[in-house]
Amino acid sequence: MENQEEQQQLNIELTEEIADGTYANLAIITHSPSEFVVDFINVMPGLPKAKVKSRIILTPQHAKRLMKALLDNVKKYEATHGTIQDQEPVSSIPMNFGGPTAQA
């Protein structure tokens, strides 16, 4: 039984378009009882408008897995490259960007 589980593999396809990536310097996270919505945004200095470049919708369980994976990767990054310095929060950006308001 264990041997069968070890042999199962998932083929993940990465198209050229997706492999190029999309730059974002702001993420807005909202949630409902059934999902987390992460909007990735590219805010350019001096421009009054910014567009959502990508929206990812996750179940609460996958959001928690993502959080743990990000924490693990940040720790590994900092162990190699040094502490990442936090920047002061930007208060002039509306935190809902037209989406639902997060509830804690």
Image (cartoon, rainbow, N blue to C red):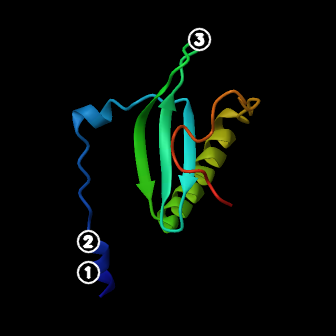
Name the kind of residue labelled 3 in the image. Gly
Please, what is the three-letter code of the amino acid marked with disc 1?
Gln
Answer few, some or many: residues within 10 Å of disc 1's Cα (few below 14, many 20 plus, some between 14 and 19): few
How far from the left and from the top, in percent, is residue 51? 45, 28
- Image height check: is 3 above or below 45? below
Q: Measure the alpha-carbon separation of dots 1 and 3.
A: 56 Å
The disc, 2 or 3, on the residue closer to the chain's N-terminal end is 2
Q: Residue at 29%, 36% (x, y): give it.
A: 18
Q: Quadrant of residue 16?
A: top left
The residue nearer to you, when weighing 31 against 24, is 31
Q: Which residue is mark 2?
A: 8
Left or right: 28 in relation to 104: left
Picture coordinates of residue 1, whole percent (x, y): 29, 88
Q: Which mark is residue 102?
A: none
Q: Is residue 38 above or below residue 59?
A: above
Amino acid type, callout 2: Gln
* 15 versus 5 height, above or below: above
Residue 28 drawn at (x, y percent) = 56, 42
Disc 2 residue crowd, few under 14, some 14–19, many 20+, Cα 10 Å? few
Disc 3 crowd rating (10 Å Cα; few below 14, some 14-19, many 20+) is few
Give yes or no for contact between labels 2 and 1 (Cβ–Cβ under 8 Å).
yes
Q: Relative to 10, is 34 on the left or the right?
A: right
- For disc 1, the marked residue is 4
Of badges 2 and 3, nearer the viewer stands 3
